[in-house]
């Protein structure tokens, strides 16, 4: 794959039956291999953090995030290079959760 790097696709969602299968199908349909997967409770009550690592291009990584947010019931999805960290990810998610809680 041209200009491929290791990307982290980070997904926040309630832990629902079939969620992992739905997300992995998005990768499979595009021929993207999931190099590693981690799932754990996030710091937000009732929300789990799914972390997928895959070798792909920036364009495809961003498309994956778009498909995940469109096709699967998730709170939010992000992507970034494996060697990058994103505290902005947590800030955006926290703001969204607080807004939903106050409604």
Image: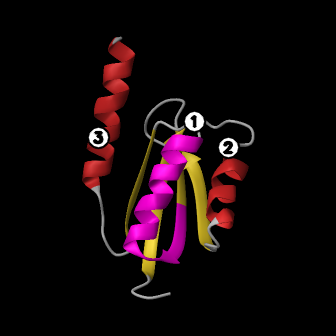
Q: Nearer the viewer, mark 3 or mark 1?
A: 1
Range drawn in magenta: 52-71
Name the residue carrying label 2: 19
Q: Is residue 20 above or below residue 2?
A: above
Classify mark 1: residues with Cα within 10 Å, few (<14), some (14-19) or many (20+).
Answer: some
Name the residue carrying label 1: 73
Which residue is farthest bottom?
A: 2
Measuring from the top left, give residue 3's x and y in whole percent. 39, 86
**Which image quarter is the C terminus in?**
top left
99 part of magenta stretch? no
Proximity of marks 2 and 1: CB atoms separated by less than 8 Å? yes
Q: Is residue 70 left or right of residue 101?
A: right
Total marks in image = 3
Q: Secondary structure at mark 3?
A: helix
Classify mark 2: residues with Cα within 10 Å, few (<14), some (14-19) or many (20+).
Answer: some
Measuring from the top left, give residue 67's x and y in whole percent. 52, 51
| Residue found at x 29% / y 58% | 86
Q: Quadrant of residue 44?
A: top left
Name the residue carrying label 3: 92
Proximity of marks 3 and 2: CB atoms separated by less than 8 Å? no
Classify mark 3: residues with Cα within 10 Å, few (<14), some (14-19) or many (20+).
Answer: few
Decide which of tag 3 and tag 1 comes sooner along the chain.
1
| Residue found at x 52% / y 35% | 47
In space, the residues marked 2 and 1 are separated at their CA atoms by 8 Å
Q: Is residue 85 left or right of residue 60?
A: left
In space, the residues marked 3 and 1 are separated at their CA atoms by 17 Å
């Amino acid at each position: 794959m041209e200009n491929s790097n290791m990307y982290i696709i980070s997904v926040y969602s309630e832990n629902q039956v079939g969620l992992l299968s739905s997300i992995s199908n998005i990768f499979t349909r595009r021929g993207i291999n999931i190099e590693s997967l981690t799932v754990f409770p996030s710091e937000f009550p009732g929300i789990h953090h799914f972390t997928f690592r895959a070798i792909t291009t920036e364009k495809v990584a961003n498309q994956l995030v778009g498909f995940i947010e469109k096709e699967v019931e998730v709170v939010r999805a992000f992507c970034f290079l494996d060697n990058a960290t994103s505290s902005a990810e947590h800030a955006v998610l926290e703001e969204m959760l607080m807004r939903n809680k106050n409604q």
